[in-house]
Amino acid sequence: MSTPSIVINVNGIEVIYNHVILVLKGVSLQVADGQIAALLGGNGAGKTTTLRSISNLLKAERGEVTKGSVEMRGERIDHLSTSDLVKRGVVQVMEGRHCFAHLTIEENLLTGAYTRSGKAEIAASLEKVYNYFPRLKTRRTSQAAYTSGGEQQMCAIGRALMANPSVLLLDEPSMGLAPQIVEEVFEIVKDLNQKERVTFLIAEQNTNMALRYADYGYIMESGRIVMDGKADDLRNNEDVKEFYLGMGGDERKSFKDIKSYKRRKRWLA
Amino acid sequence: MFYRENGQFKTTYKSDQQIFGVKQDRIAIIALIAFAFIGVPLLADEYLFRAILVPFLILSLAAIGVNILVGYCGQISLGSGAFMAVGAYMAYNVFMRVEDMPLIVALLSGGFFAMVAGIIFGIPSLRVKGLYLAVATLAAQFFFDWLFVRVRWFTLDSPAGTAEVSNLSVLGWQLDSSVDKYLFVLGFVVVFALLAKNLVRGPIGREWMAIRDMDVAASVIGIRPAYAKLTAFAVSSFIIGVAGALWAFIHLGSWEPLTFDINRSFQLLFIVIIGGLGSIMGCFFGAAFIVISPILLNQLLPWIGRLFGVEISTSMVGHAEFMILGALIIWILIKEPHGLAKYWSMARHKLRLWPFPH
Amino acid sequence: MGFLIETVIAGLMNGVLYALVALGFVLIFKASGVFNFAQGAMVLFAALAMARFAEWLPEWLGFESLLLANILAFAIAAFLMFVFAWAVERFVLRHLVNQEGVTLLMATLGITFFIDGFGQTIFGSDIYAINLGLPDEPIFILEGLFAGGLLINSDDLVTALMAMAMVALLTLFFQKTGTGRALRAVADDHQAAQSVGIPLGRMWVIVWFMAGLTALVAGMIWGEKMGVQFALTFVALKALPVIILGGLTSVPGAIVAGLIIGVSEQLAEVYIGPLVGGGIQIWFAYVLAMVVLLFRPQGLFGEKIIDRV
Amino acid sequence: QAPAAAPASASATVQFFPSLTGRTGAVAPNAAPFANGFADYMKLVNARGGINGVQTLVEECETAYATDRGVECYERLKGRHGGATVFQPLSTGITFALMPRLAADRIPMITSGYGRSDTADGAIFPWVFPLLGHYWIGGDVVLQHIANQAGGWDRLRGQTIAVVYHDSPFGRELLPIINRRAEMHGFTVLALPVPPPGVEQRAIWMQIRQQRPDYVIMQTWGVMTATAIRQAIATGFPRDRMFGTWWSGAEPDLRDIGADARGYSAVMMQHGQARNSEVVRQILAQVHDRGQGTGPRAEVGDVLYMRGVVGAMLATEGVLRAQERFGRGRHVTGEQARWGYENLNITQARLDALGFAGVLRGPIATSCRNHVGTALMRIHTWNGSGFDWSSDWLQADMNVITRMVTASAESFARDNNITRRTEPGC
Amino acid sequence: MSKKKIGEVILDVNNISLRFGGVKALSDISFNVREHEIRAIIGPNGAGKSSMLNCINGVYKPQEGSITFRGQTFKHMNSRQVAELGVARTFQNLALFKGMSVIDNLMTGRNLRIKSNLLLQALRWGPAEREETEHREKVEHIIDFLEIQAHRKTPVGQLPYGLQKRVDLGRALAMEPKVLLLDEPMAGMNVEEKQDMCRFVLDVNDEFGTTIVLIEHDMSVVMDISDRVVVLDYGKKIGDGSPGEVRANPDVISAYLGTSH
Ligand SMILES: Nc1ncnc2c1ncn2[C@@H]1O[C@H](COP(=O)(O)OP(=O)(O)OP(=O)(O)O)[C@@H](O)[C@H]1O
Ligand SMILES: Nc1ncnc2c1ncn2[C@@H]1O[C@H](COP(=O)(O)OP(=O)(O)OP(=O)(O)O)[C@@H](O)[C@H]1O
Ligand SMILES: CC(C)C[C@H](N)C(=O)O
Ligand SMILES: [Mg+2]
Ligand SMILES: [Mg+2]
């Protein structure tokens, strides 16, 4: 079996915010064509930062990549602007929604198609998004600021789909979504991945979900990748089980019985 | 030897709450103040005092006032010039109309009236936000400009509508020479800066910042937006008013409302933003920049021209000064949107870690 | 009665001019969330360019037609405004993505300083004239109806027409085109706009150029009436109460508010001014705008200010 | 209190005349020619061999007509080049701000045609010299001219005179004399302030159209004047009933308006446009032709340019006078120069010799009680492309003026604990 | 673990209806909360959960209905009053004071209890200083409790999302509330972090007896730690009861839980 070609290749990058705060300390990862890769890790591990450095949204946060490189299909993309990347099909869904508050839901979705032309195709995409998220259709004329948190999350994901991406970077897509919708979102991911061969890199806290749908996983801790492997292997790893899936032994532990005792993670020892 | 806080264990919260947490900072600040009081008078000449130091100090003070409102409480105001004017004219009236009025009381009363004006013109802030508020505060600016010109009463019916004071003294200390004036202003500024610092790092300062950062959340934890905003307007315009009175009494001696026109308001806002929003220290940096750089450019440009054998005309210098100042401002904003104060804290941060970065 | 009508007309005409300057503000604010204090300086710069080139070109090229000179000068001025827009994006805005409103506002003040100095350096600081060939002397109409007739200036009428046309075009642009929508998106959230592939840089050049054109038109008309000089920048201050009264984001709002302010300050100055010593025009518009804001914090036509938790 | 003759210091080989300019901003069109004339005349003096051999030196500092910048310029320049001789701040606002500092620094100030009118009383304002005229004199002369045209002061009774003025100390300084005359002759004053820089005057001219005053007097400056005249045209106010004071009657105000402004007049502090005068010829020959001209050649001889020339002449003549007392061919200090300005006696012959024949009329003689020197004025009128004299020499009624000056100066002295100088002649 | 004592009704929501223009965010909602219990509110996105909290603490004014808190009945609440009565909350979309340090954020939670006036504060003299130190001690306890010591002086805007959530909780705790309203406190956390958060919530509930109203989408959390659950859907109440009852409710299953859970 030939190894699928690498689409996104992050090569030992270091990121510094504000000229002083070193956040990524040499992160490398690869996402293969047509793959769903999951980026896992605790709060502050640097997942968002990694995604931002791929889509080149760091500058607005006063961050910069000081070492390493980011490549797409072998070509360096660290100097391309976000909008060029979108044109090449790399789209990021930002953490924390970021809908255009004063625009209606529909207008929000339409801005997502900014880089595309062709009225009919755009209309078709819009229909597709409304199919995925019927809730959006009912709220289409409401200004985004006045919709609920979950509705905004759907809007943000839908907006990214409107660009007809080939590589989608999702930053915590499940956050704030009702369980059913989370499931749907991942189904959509799988659907797009299988039918339209969209490649995904998903930063996710919902490890359980993520590993269920992903092909490959990376685990980050304080700015480094500490473990990676096939999603199935990770799911069976003892540490991952305990820390990311909440299983002591084989049973899921009840949240009620958590003790304040914490075991040190093995890879940090 | 090193700038370190290691080893300086804070055993009480009280000590952790000091203004300058690191001992070296404390020493440096005290040394700086001592130098300002003792060293500067020995070293500086008349020009430095009158054209640079005194305006610098007074503008720093005014900027502290503006910073409380804009930087700490997040209410953008373009009316600061007006509150300076209120301070100046009301102090003038109190000083001239009341027999034997002590100078300091007159100056403070200028602050008091500015505070009243500030509260009145702060009322829109209860409903109006952001840039809308900024423009609304211009109403204060233009209204007071007009008032002090038009209503003769404020200028004791002087025919040309100017105000002047002379022969100032405090408890027998004649404020004649420029050194006297400098020391007097310095005293005011140091005291007010400390009081302001105490306020902004205390409970009320936290209320202001909370309103600035997220007013709905602030009200949910029990902060009354009206109270917080109006106290910010009050404290801010009090300080600005005192600065206005100082500007008029000590710096100019004779003035007209144009002294406090809209350009003054912009200038103060510049100081605050270049210096750093939400930083008392930044006010001094910003004021130094805004006071010194035009003067420096103005003097430097002809000199540079002469180096290259060209005589740069005054008007050319004037225009170039504008251009360069404009470009400098943009450059600073780009380099460090949090202002010069950020460099200050970054420098300290690096010094603390030096020689081991990260 | 005749005088009242005249005052109202004079106010309306002033209002149109305020509105033209205000439009530039609104454009930029609506499209990038930047409160552009440099609009006044842009008016001056554009007007200076127009005035000077109209004077220089016939000298350089040796022709005499006033019309030709004006057209060419307008084209050059428009081109300069484009270069200006490009430079603003390249050297300023690009580096200030995602910064707070005040910071951006201050940056535009920096731009103001810069082009005030720059414009005067290359174009000079004397008073220059823009001559569009419109008559200056007033026309008196309806002399039978009112003693002394009604005073009308023909250039006022031309101005009013131009302003109307611009407003109509701009309104359509923002509401109906994809670019218009993208511009509004940029105003809401720079980062998110980037993330969907809107090229901020290009957007900014577009709006600043459009604002530059409005500035040029405004400057041309003011210049025709008043002459062109540094003091023109101060006119921009008059546009501020107009935009907050109309709402920072509303194109039609700028026009309506411009007219309201033009008329009401004229009436106030003429009828109330003398009672309190005159000169109240300088603050009347601001106080009016402030009072209206107390009832409608977003101005008459502005989008509601959203704050949600 | 004549200062003792100071030993000429070796370093001071030049006489330093600081020049506070308004070459940028809203007043630039008008203030720049003044600075050019000032600088050119100083160069001419040097070309002529200096003041008894002492070369003059000019250094400019830009105030843009802003008071605080003026104060900074003053502080910056006062000690340079052996000490400033005399300041001419070219702004009433700045004169107000500098006045308290002059005595301490012992530097005089010439405020020809601006500043406080009551400083004419040298017994109370020893350091300030409104040479050739101040606004009260100007106001008085304009009214006289209007009265003459109307056929006598009584013809003004019941009439209305509007005053359109720069809303600043400068503008307001004119009002006292107008009001005083209004009381005396029973006309009504319509005071119409224009906020600086003065681009918004529509409402004011609407008011003028409504109230239909018989005359309009303008105390305006910079771009405000041109705007006023344009508004007058737009509202149809007859230009031949509009009168400016000297800062509002110069070429930059009218050039671009041209024929439409025909008939507009302004009172001149003696001189007006003087393209054909001897001094202009000399400046062209000895300064401009040698490539040392300060401004554009076309402007030499214009009204405001000439005012700069006259300002420089007064400044150097005072030094000359001081040298007579403190040592010919020597540098004089500011304090010594002050004595010179207070003891001027520039005769017509001297003026002619300097090239001011037909420009100024002598004698210009000052004393402790009289810091003005002369109060002769003329009116000129715009003919569509230049100015023509439209009146004879007019003399302000010093009975009226001096009384106002003394009263105002006395009250200033009271408020500021100043005692009247008591030396002989004061 | 000792069976905790659930007390009387402390908060009673009666027939609340809330509309925004045409959108009916809440229609005729009633439920109550008992002292010391953990009461969860669940429901699909846009169901009106956050709006419900907003009504309780006075950010929204419902058109109909009333709220009874500790015996006092209100037509609608006023934020300040609610805070004084001892209700604190956290926000779904982080509403922290971004420019302020962690300590300062928590200290704002104590502002209601500050007694010294402006003048004393400016002078930082005697009582003011002492008061500040006392509150600081309380806040430090919370910081220890939430294990965010290391970030004490960092501006919260620079903290990663998860820690910000913790600070948000800390600020609410600093008010020493009787009732704590939590809006999706565990969104964006991984299991380990959720476990921590649960521990905090349970500890607060146990140690201080704080009543907790919790909105959460993670069903395992809700099922594990809550005592009773209200289910909203499109602004209507479709279920109310113990976790077990709710999980078995067919309406709830079809509207929210789906089949896979
Ligand atoms: N704009 C910024 N300025 C300074 N520091 C930042 C900035 N953004 C992130 N950081 C820091 O970078 C580190 C990594 O943050 P990042 O947002 O990438 O984490 P994350 O893995 O996405 O966490 P979470 O799951 O909470 O979203 C954190 O310690 C954070 O404090
Ligand atoms: N201020 C408002 N203006 C207009 N509509 C609003 C406003 N606040 C909420 N809504 C609407 O009310 C409905 C309920 O919103 P709410 O935020 O309470 O949902 P939620 O249950 O918290 O959902 P989620 O789980 O997605 O956060 C939504 O459809 C929302 O669009
Ligand atoms: C040239 C200037 C001195 C005139 C000015 N308008 C003033 O009196 O202030
Ligand atoms: Mg993240
Ligand atoms: Mg919600």
Image (cartoon, coloured by chain):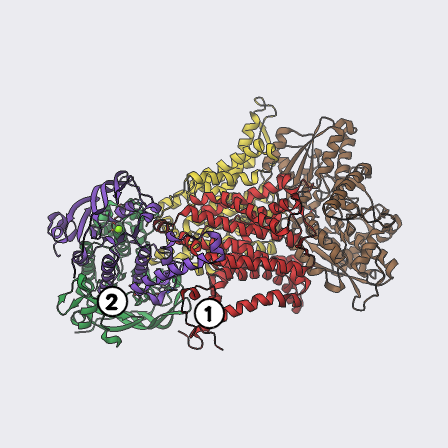
Chain colours: A green, B red, C yellow, D brown, E purple
x%, y% of residue C170?
42, 44
In the image: residue C47, left or right of residue E1:
right
Q: Taking A4 as reference, is E45 above or below it?
A: above
- Identity, as a three-letter code, of the amino acid under mark 1: Val
Q: Which picture quadrant has residue C7?
A: top right
Q: How many marks?
A: 2
Q: Nearer the viewer, residue C161 or A183?
A: A183
Q: Is residue D27 above or below residue B276?
A: above
Q: Is residue E119 left or right of residue E169?
A: right
Q: CA distance from mark 2 to mark 1?
A: 39 Å
Q: Nearer the viewer, residue C124 or D412?
A: D412
Q: Give the letter of the chain under mark 2.
A: A
Q: In the rendered image, is residue C226 in sight? A: yes
The structure residue drawn at horizontal position 73% and vertical position 43%, both measured from the top left corner, is: D246
What x and y, as percent, mark residue D15?
79, 61
Give the camera-side residue of E55 and A89: E55
Name the side, left or right, on which D152 lies relative to B318. right
What residue is disc 1 on? B22
Q: Chain of mark 1?
A: B
Q: Secondary structure at mark 1?
A: loop
> Which quadrant of the rendered structure holds the C terminus of chain A?
bottom left
Label 2 SS = strand
Q: Residue furthest top?
A: C144
* Label 2 Cα crowd, 10 Å radius (few <14 / some 14-19 / many 20+): many
Q: Is residue E43 visible?
A: no
The vertical placement of D191 against B223, above or below, is: above
Answer with left or right where residue E129 lies relative to residue C142: left
Q: How many residues crowd mark 1 within 10 Å: few (<14), some (14–19), many (20+)?
A: some
Residue picked out by circle 2: A40
